[in-house]
Image (cartoon, rainbow, N blue to C red):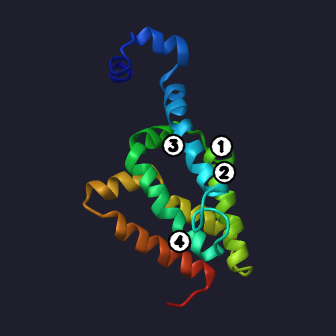
Amino acid sequence: MDAVAKAANVGKGTLYRRFGDRESLLLAVFSEREAAFQDELLHGPPPLGPGATPEERLHAFAPAYLALLEEIGPIVAAVEDGMPASRYRSGPYASYELHLRVLLAQGNPECDAEWGAQSLLALLRAGHVMNLRRQGVDLDRMVRGWCIMVDALLGNRR
């Protein structure tokens, strides 16, 4: 809160009056950028947005989300860490899960799309990604791993 107050050139008390607590401030910062990402998923150009095959859209999701994490990863990690388990059934996480579940089901009706979507999202938890980045794992390697998982769930043999 101190760093945010200083950057905004306001007192810490002003932040607490406006946002109430740290989690609310983090959600406010996260929400704006996350809404733009959601818009890309729903209305943006292919392959992330509509108009591409389910496979192409699934392959495009990880690079786009990893780019978001490169931008605001610590904020996303703090939001995730503060989320009670019940919040995974609402908000952005639930939207991403639904998005991935629908694409998996379209791409492979035999796939356990619910499990697959949740498993794929586990690969992109901000804290996990940030830990891998600290270990020197580059984004291309993460994307390749994501695509291997997607292909396995879709029943593709490459």
Mark 1–mark 2 contact, CB under 8 Å?
A: yes
Quarter of image, res 10: top left
Q: Which residue is tagged 4?
A: 59
Q: Nearer the viewer, residue 52 or 144?
A: 52
Q: Secondary structure at mark 1?
A: helix
Q: In 3D space, how far apart are the residues under numbered discs 3 and 2 (Cα atoms)?
A: 13 Å
Q: In 3D space, how far apart are the residues under numbered discs 4 and 1 (Cα atoms)?
A: 22 Å
Instruction: Name which residue type carries label 3.
Output: Glu
Residue 143 vs residue 57: left or right? left
- Badge 4: few (under 14), some or many (20 or more) residues near its Cα, within 10 Å? many
Q: Which residue is tagged 3?
A: 80
Q: In 3D space, how far apart are the residues under numbered discs 4 and 3 (Cα atoms)?
A: 23 Å
Q: Position of residue 6 (x, y in %)?
A: 33, 18
Whichever of labels 2 and 4 marks the residue nearer the N terminus, that label is 4
* The label number, if any, that marks residue 94 in the structure image: 2
Instruction: Name which residue type carries label 1.
Output: Gly
Instruction: Name which residue type carries label 2.
Output: Ala
